[in-house]
Image (cartoon, helix red, strand yellow):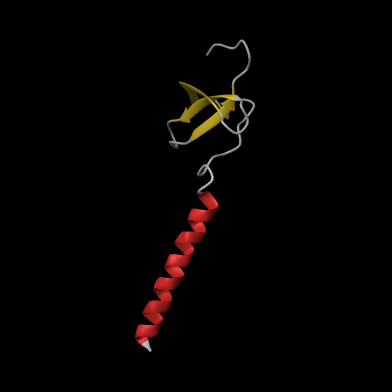
């Protein structure tokens, strides 16, 4: 009976990994772009890129406290 439980456990683990892969494979974990930087402790990294799905120019902002990155829509004519 113990052998059956071990096999069942590994089948469940494999199924969970496949499910996670299916959920995140289309572009990975990525938030929706923001219209403005999230807060005061966020700094512009100098990185800009064009989002392939939307065609928008996005800026990358970084919070040193949490290590989180945020994507903010670049405003036309704005040099940061």
Q: Position of residue 68 (x, y in %)?
A: 47, 36
Relative to 13, does residue 31 appear above or below in the rendering? above
Task: Pick the residue in front: 16 or 38.
Answer: 16
Is 45 situated left or right of 74 in this image?
left
Q: Position of residue 29 (x, y in %)?
A: 51, 44
Relative to 19, does residue 11 appear above or below in the rendering? below
Q: Position of residue 77 (x, y in %)?
A: 61, 10
Q: Residue reaching furthest bottom?
A: 1
Task: Pick the residue in front: 62 or 32.
Answer: 32
Q: Decide if residue 41 is in sight here.
A: no
Q: Position of residue 74 (x, y in %)?
A: 59, 20
Q: Residue at x 43, y 67 (%)?
A: 13
Label count reads 0
What is the quadrant of the N terminus in the image?
bottom left
- For residue 38, which quarter of the picture? top right
Is 76 situated left or right of 30 in this image?
right
Q: Residue at x 47, y 66 (%)?
A: 15
Is 33 situated left or right of 43 in this image?
right
Relative to 28, does residue 33 appear above or below in the rendering? above
Q: Residue at x 58, y 27 (%)?
A: 72
Q: Decide if residue 56 is in sight here.
A: yes
Task: Pick the residue in front: 31 or 15.
Answer: 15
- For residue 35, which quarter of the picture? top right
Q: Residue reaching furthest left?
A: 3
Q: Residue at x 52, y 49 (%)?
A: 24
């Amino acid at each position: 009976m113990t052998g059956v439980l071990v096999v069942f456990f590994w089948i469940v683990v494999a199924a969970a990994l496949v499910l996670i892969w299916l959920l995140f494979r289309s572009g990975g974990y990525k938030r929706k772009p923001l219209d403005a930087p999230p807060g005061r402790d966020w700094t512009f990294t100098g990185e800009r890129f064009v989002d392939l799905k939307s065609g928008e120019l996005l800026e990358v902002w970084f919070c040193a406290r949490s290590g989180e990155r945020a994507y903010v829509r670049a405003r036309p004519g704005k040099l940061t």
